[in-house]
């Protein structure tokens, strides 16, 4: 019973983490323009994501444009694209394994095999958390380094966007859910039943009556 509850909790956390990772991958808010020093014009805000860049006017109008070429992106953004997509695919694979091996489903009959399949799903979610965390930390480190660098112009400096925080939350949920699924174990096997032998009753004997050919009990 406890193992089943842990599986459900781990699966719920992992699914939520996968959805948040997909949201962080799609939102164009990885980098946000920083209004510092001489760059105090707040009439527009620039957002930069993995797939597009957006400009928000003070009137509320938003204009977005896809990147013209993948090769024109920085190495960190190219790596973030690849790893976040792989992380989403790994999360979907972990979901399939966790559902197939869950105790509340009948896709697999053998209990020991079901536990191993659930453990494999948990390992897939842990791997997905690592794949999400690596590009997030890399991009965040680049943003902080450029922000503190004196060689970067104030107009080119960026701040950490909301997508990175959402991605960190997704990685935490994936890691927690995957760890719970990895702790799943098969239910204890039922104790084997052995035939019970009754001792012979004392004080009773069986004799054969040769004359009548019948059993007389004394």
Image (cartoon, helix red, strand yellow):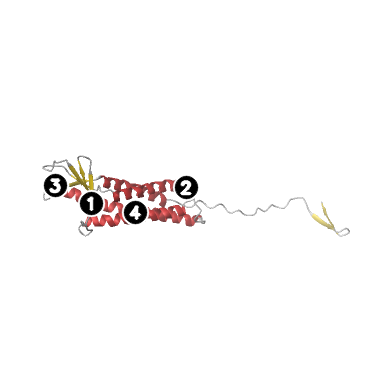
**What residue does disc 4 label?**
88
Q: Which of the two discs, 2 and 3, labels the residue nearer the N terminus?
A: 2
Mark 1 nearby-residue class (10 Å; few <14, some 14–19, many ≥20): few
Mark 3 nearby-residue class (10 Å; few <14, some 14–19, many ≥20): some
Whether the residues at callouts 1 and 3 have beta carbons within 8 Å, the answer is no
In the rendered image, is residue 123 in sight? Answer: no
Q: Which secondary structure lies at badge 1?
A: strand
**What residue does disc 3 label?**
155
Which circle marks residue 4 in the picture?
Answer: 2
| Horizontal and vertical percent position of residue 84 | 30, 54
Foreground residue among 19 and 194: 19
Q: Which of the two discs, 2 and 1, labels the residue nearer the N terminus?
A: 2
Which circle marks residue 65 in the picture?
Answer: 1
| Horizontal and vertical percent position of residue 25 | 29, 51
Q: Give the Cα distance between marks 1 and 4.
A: 24 Å
The mark lying in front, picked from 1 and 3, is 1
In this view, which residue lies farthest toward the top? 59
| Horizontal and vertical percent position of residue 111 | 50, 55
The mark lying in front, picked from 3 and 4, is 3
Q: Give the Cα distance between marks 3 and 4.
A: 33 Å
Whether the residues at callouts 3 and 4 have beta carbons within 8 Å, the answer is no
Mark 2 nearby-residue class (10 Å; few <14, some 14–19, many ≥20): some
Total numbered labels placed on residues in the image: 4
Q: Which secondary structure lies at badge 4?
A: helix
Q: Is residue 11 left or right of residue 209?
A: left
Q: Which secondary structure lies at badge 2?
A: helix
């Amino acid at each position: 019973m406890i193992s089943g509850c842990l599986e459900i909790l781990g699966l719920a956390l992992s699914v939520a983490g996968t959805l948040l990772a997909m949201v962080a991958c799609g939102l164009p808010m990885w980098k946000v323009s920083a209004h510092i020093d001489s760059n105090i014009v707040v009439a527009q805000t620039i957002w930069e994501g993995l797939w597009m860049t957006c400009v928000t006017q003070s009137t509320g109008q938003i204009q977005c444009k896809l990147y013209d070429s993948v090769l024109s992106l920085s190495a960190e953004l190219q790596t973030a694209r690849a790893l976040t997509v792989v992380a989403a695919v790994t999360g979907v694979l972990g979901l399939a394994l966790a559902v197939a091996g869950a105790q509340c489903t009948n896709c697999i009959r053998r209990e020991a095999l079901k536990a191993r399949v659930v453990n494999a799903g948990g390992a897939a979610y842990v791997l997905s958390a690592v794949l999400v965390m690596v590009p997030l930390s890399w991009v965040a480190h680049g943003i902080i380094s450029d922000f503190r660098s004196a060689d970067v112009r104030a107009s080119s400096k960026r701040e950490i966007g909301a997508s990175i925080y959402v991605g960190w939350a997704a990685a935490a949920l994936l890691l927690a859910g995957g760890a719970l699924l990895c702790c799943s174990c098969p239910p204890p096997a039922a104790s084997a039943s052995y035939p019970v032998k009754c001792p012979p009753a004392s004080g009773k004997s069986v004799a054969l009556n040769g004359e009548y050919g019948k059993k007389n009990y004394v």
